[in-house]
Amino acid sequence: MKRLAFAVALVLGLALVGCQKAPEKAADNATANATAAEEKVVVNGIDGGGFPPYAFVDKEGKTVGFDVEAIEWIGKKMGFKVKHQPVEWSAIIPALEAKKIDVICSGMSATAERAQRVNFSDPYYQVTQVLVAKADSKATLEQMLTTNKKIGVQRGTVTAKYLEDLSKKPGMKFKLVQYDSSDLAMQDLPVGRIDGSGMDNTIAKEVLKKDQNVKVIGTFDAAPENYGYAVRKDDAELLAKINEGLKLLMADPYWQELKKKYDID
């Protein structure tokens, strides 16, 4: 009888232990699911040729820049992690559409043409288009455009599109030379392969910091462009999170710290 009573007690004890562990296991699963949800990764496409001060890879191989730190801050606030993926600029919207990346936070102008294919966040900065030449150049902007000069530009940019359209207008006589990055264009400028290079004023500002042998000779007669973050047309949820996070960021002291750090007016 004692053996039978002991066996019954043992079975009941094991049953109780099992009942106690079931809720614990369910809690562990819930925690794991919550962690997985919190660790959603958003892939940010950046200009593969580098676009300082907005997004570029530094000498240590780390992805840095104003937009890089901005979207990382937004991600922390809105519950997603950010991975940065360099992409050739002329192919960056197709990469977004093909879901190779989830967002473009890399100093992209929110043009009407691009807005036909992507949705943009609220604007956060405004830029103009300028022409950079060698410091000893005597040519004016008008002369550069009307005397068969060679003007470099990064393909796939707003500046490239503007210059392509401008070259077709009466009186315009210049040869447009397109590059994979503004850096490559600026390498050709000192050796005379091109006479000037068109770019956003923000890029020009960075160029002049590094090279005292160049200057801005003029601003193109083009409407200023707003920068915005781009997402796929069907990704309304991510766009809403980015807009909410961007609003929080621009109201936070960190926004001014970022602008000061990257010398953005």
Image (spheres, rainbow, N blue to C red):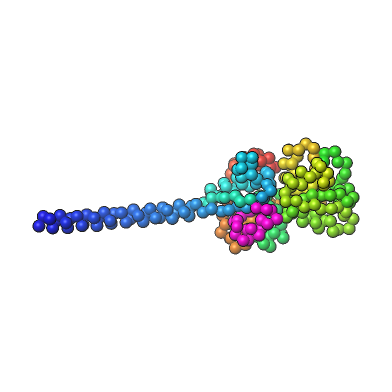
Q: Which residues are magenta?
A: 87-105
206 displayed left or right of 240: right
Residue at 60 percent of width and 56 percent of height: 101
Residue 96 within the segment the image draws in magenta: yes
157 displayed left or right of 139: left
Q: Nearer the viewer, residue 223 or 155?
A: 155
Residue at 73 percent of width and 45 percent of height: 183
Q: Is residue 67 above or below residue 212?
A: below
Image quarter (top left, top right, bottom left or bottom right) of the C terminus? top right
Residue 67 within the segment the image draws in magenta: no
Residue at 57 percent of width and 57 percent of height: 238
Residue 250: x and y in percent read 61, 46
127 displayed left or right of 237: right
Residue extending furthest toward the left = 1
User: Which of the 4 quarters of the picture holds residue 112?
Assistant: bottom right
Residue at 58 percent of width and 44 percent of height: 252
Residue 203: x and y in percent read 73, 45
Q: Nearer the viewer, residue 225 or 69?
A: 69
Let me know if residue 136 appears in the view.
Answer: yes
Let me know if residue 258 appears in the view.
Answer: no
Image quarter (top left, top right, bottom left or bottom right) of the N terminus? bottom left
Residue 80: x and y in percent read 53, 52
